[in-house]
Image (tube, rainbow, N blue to C red):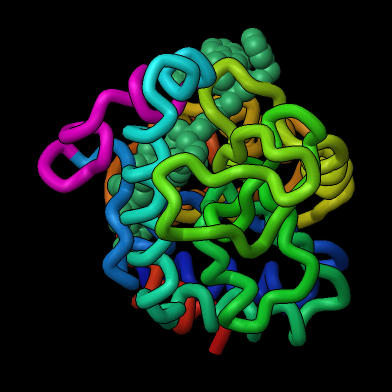
Amino acid sequence: MNDLDDVITILATALSTARHVTVLTGAGVSAESGIPTFRDAQTGLWSHFDPEELASPAGFARNPALVWRWYAERRVKACTAQPNPAHHALADLATLVPRLTLVTQNIDGLHQRAGSPQVIELHGNIHRARCTVDGSIHTTWDYDEELPQCPNCGALLRPDVVWFGEYLPPGALEAAYAATLDCDVFCSIGTSGVVEPAASLPRIALSRGATVLILNLEQTTTARSPLFTVYGKAGEVLPRLVA
Ligand code: BJW
């Protein structure tokens, strides 16, 4: 089953008869919006930046100003980026199937801007900040401040994202697991599948008998066992799948 047209026809049929479709997205879905992925050898964020320094609680404790500067730059990039055809196709798909659960590892908010309802954000959102003391969530803060403070208690704010070694937001992982266990079609799109616990979701869906699609530019660890693997750009393949 190597011919892309055949695979797309089979998957489009699976989608048209699906009761519940669960979609997991990663950085590759936003790549065509100009937002860098993490692990691309040339352009990935982790090829230029140290995750231990910028995306870990210890790194933030050592140098919060450095971490805030990095997230401020990325927040501006996310604000100016536009949803691409992959985001729009997934928003369209939600209107075409009886039930769609969209689970994203992305923090850029582009799925919501494309019109996808009820997005489960596993790794938080770059457009929010969280108080390091009282846990309150803020959607605006003083962007010019090197170390933004909580308006409630004056403590340091941090980006409301999930760093390595941190638990995922309460309820998000449970909702993702529930949707993975319940779906009859599971699509993993634009993720390298190396970061747990998200990386386990396709395997869980497969073990429950769902039709599993991995759509990615290249071979991923997750792609070893799924029923269908499509190599291509999400912004080109997804609109064909949903048309
Ligand atoms: C295209 C494309 C196009 C390009 N079209 N495709 C079990 C085993 C081993 C380790 C662990 C484990 N459980 C927990 C861990 C530790 C850790 C982990 O998984 N480490 C591994 C790396 C080894 N996980 C955690 O720490 C997580 N917490 C947790 O599990 O808590 C419980 C716990 C706590 C303590 C101890 C034990 C358990 C938290 C993970 C947080 C991840 N955070 C980041 C940063 C978010 C904030 C930010 O953005 O700054 O999340 S890291 C980064 O990786 C980001 C992403 O969401 C995540 C996944 O990356 P993604 O999306 O897959 O991007 P890429 O770049 O890797 O891949 C893109 C793909 O797209 C590529 O394949 C391209 O080919 C493709 N592509 N263009 C289609 N146009």
Residue 122 falls left or right of residue 84: right
In the image, the segment drawn in magenta is: 41-56
Please tell me which residue is depicted at 46% across the width and 74% down the height of the picture.
86
Q: Would you place residue 66 above or below residue 213 in this image? A: above
**Residue 116 visible, this angle:** yes
Where in the figure is residue 29, as x and y percent of width and height? 43, 62
Residue 242 falls left or right of residue 131: left
- Where, by quadrant of the figure, is residue 42 drawn? top left
Residue 83 falls left or right of residue 226: left
In this view, which residue lies farthest toward the left?
42
Where in the figure is residue 119, as x and y percent of width and height? 72, 62
Q: Would you place residue 115 above or below residue 154 in this image? A: below
Please tell me which residue is depicted at 87% across the width and 76% down the height of the picture.
98
Where in the figure is residue 184, as x and y percent of width and height? 80, 55
Please tell me which residue is depicted at 87% across the width and 40% down the height of the picture.
171
The reply to whether the magenta stretch includes residue 44 is yes
**Residue 223 visible, this angle:** no
In the rendered view of the protein, which quadrant contains the N terminus? Answer: bottom left
In this view, which residue lies farthest toward the front?
154
Where in the figure is residue 78, as x and y percent of width and height? 41, 66
Please tell me which residue is depicted at 46% across the width and 59% down the height of the picture.
143
**How many labels were placed on the picture?**
0
Foreground of the two, 239 or 158? 158
In this view, which residue lies farthest toward the bottom?
243
